[in-house]
Every structure is written in C-alpha cells, then in structure tokens.
Image (cartoon, helix red, strand yellow):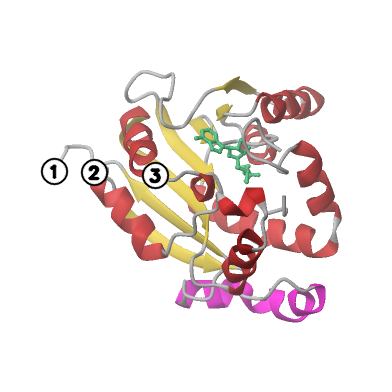
Amino acid sequence: MPSGQASDLPDLGPEAYVRWRASEIGALTERLERRLILELVGEVAGRRVLDVGCGDGELAVALARQGAAVTGIDASAAMIGAAETRARRSDADATFRVARAEQLPFPDGQFDIVTAVTILCFVEDAAPVFREIARVLRPGGRLVIGELGRWSTWALGRRLRAWFGSPLWRRGRFRSARELRGLAEQAGLAVVTVRGAIFYPRSRLAARLLGRFDAALGRAFTVGAGFVALSASKPIRPA
Ligand SMILES: C[S@@+](CC[C@H](N)C(=O)[O-])C[C@H]1O[C@@H](n2cnc3c(N)ncnc32)[C@H](O)[C@@H]1O
C-alpha cells in the first residue's frame, strides 16, 4: 500500500496508487497481496461480488474480468472516478458508487462474496463495517478481508511516521489476525482461513531476496506479516 488522498484520507488517492505500483517494491508487494486475496476469494464466475473500499478499482476490475458481476463502493469520489475509468477501459462488468462501509446502500443478502482490502486500517471502529458486510452477504456467502498486520516492521514504520506527523498514518489502525477473527465472529461469520503475507521489511533488496519465500511463510505465520488476510462464511442458519 502506498505511503500516502481520498476524500477524507490525506495523501492517499489514485495518483499515490499509480506511483506505488510503478515502483519495484510496490509492484512486488501488490502482486503478493493480490495473489493471496484471489486465492481466498476462489471461483467468482457468475457470482455477485461487492468490493468495499474499492479504491481505484484494481481488484474489482480483475474480478469482473473473471466473470463476476462486481459492485465497488468507496467513500472517496476521486477513487470511484478512477475505478469507473479503469472499468470502462477494460470493458469490465463492474459498477461503482460513493458510499460508506458503515452504511452499505444495499438490501440484505444481496452478494455472494464481499471483499474489503486495506480499508479497515482507516476505520476506527470496525465492528459496524463487519455487521454491514454480514448483512449484505447471502447465507452461505463469503467475506475476504485483507488488512495491514499489527505485528510487522511495516506497521512499526507507519507508527513512526504518525509519530513524526504524517496525517495519513495518524489515522492508521493496525489489527492482528486475532482481532480480525474476533470482529468477524462477533458479526456472526465463521472464520475459514487466516493467512499472512509480506514478511520482508520495506526495502527493495529485502523484497527481491525474500519475496519468493512469502507464500510459504504466510501459510505458517501471521505474526511478522505486513498484510493479513482472512476468509469467513455466513452460516446458512444463524447460530
Ligand atoms: C488503502 S485504500 C485501498 C483501496 C483498495 N481496496 C485496494 O486495495 O487497492 C483504502 C480505501 O478505503 C476507502 N475508505 C476508507 N474508509 C472508508 C469507509 N469508511 N467507507 C468506504 N470507503 C472507505 C478509502 O477512500 C480508500 O480508497
């Protein structure tokens, strides 16, 4: 994830993402994170997918190209504009709207799959977001979350930046796998898989050397991971 403008997020906008993905470490890191998310999402052809906090629509468009009917929401109008442009250029079956994750503008049980990648790191109270996601999922549907891990050198660096005055990272919240699991369970979801990724520090050389071991590490650990991913399903019958 880049360092730093969404509507109310300082220094985090579509341009920051373009710069991040153009850098060597950004491209590698995004690739590893995306691979993990796509693995947990699984088969999407014919499914109705909601991407919450979709940013510039990279994941939403990738899923639409695999045959899903995708809706993306984001609090930032600039991000939604960038996502619409991306979808138009790719001729992808994806629609986007400005909305907040705490109040999703959809009826109950509307989606087969909900994804939410690095959005909770800017949400102080994540419980209402999990409740909304659980509400819009159909029984048997699946949530896939990707978040900035709490116990990692990346989180440490971002905390230091907050300490030195970064307005973006002052809003940063880093959650452990255990906290994410607890939030999903409180919302009535059953956790299926928890995985880690991005075990190297924020260094191009370290990424080059250690990136190849990342998937194996991520199957064994979440502590040390810059990125934590979780999949959970909505029970067919409420507990
Ligand atoms: C770090 S970006 C991630 C974008 C995208 N999910 C990705 O992984 O490339 C976080 C996004 O979450 C959005 N966001 C933050 N808080 C939100 C909220 N409460 N409701 C909806 N979107 C939110 C921001 O506008 C931003 O586009």
Residue 59 placement (x, y as % from top left): 64, 41
In the shown orientation, is residue 158 left or right of residue 194?
right
Q: Residues within 10 Å of mark 1 (few under 14, many from 20)?
A: few
Mark 3–mark 2 distance (CA, rounded to whole Å):
14 Å
- Mark number for residue 126? 3
* N-term mark: 1 or 2: 2
Q: Does 190 sit above or below residue 7?
A: below
**Callout 2 environment at 10 Å: few (<14), some (14 to 19), or many (20+)?**
some
Q: Which numbered disc, 1 or 3, marks the residue that appears first in the sequence?
A: 3
Quadrant, the C terminus: top left
| CB under 8 Å between discs 1 and 2 | yes
**Position of residue 3 measured from the top left corner of the image (x, y, whole percent):** 72, 54
Q: Earlier in the sequence, mark 3 or mark 2?
A: 3
As drawn, 54 above or below 195: above
Q: Which mark is residue 135?
A: none
Task: Identify the residue at image location x=58%, y=64%.
Answer: 159
**Looking at the image, in which quadrant does ligand 1 appear?**
top right
Q: Is residue 45 magenta?
A: no
Locate residue 163, reporting x and y percent. Answer: 61, 63
Identify the magenta region.
204-220
The residue singled out by tag 1 in the image is 239
x then y, percent, for residue 71: 55, 26
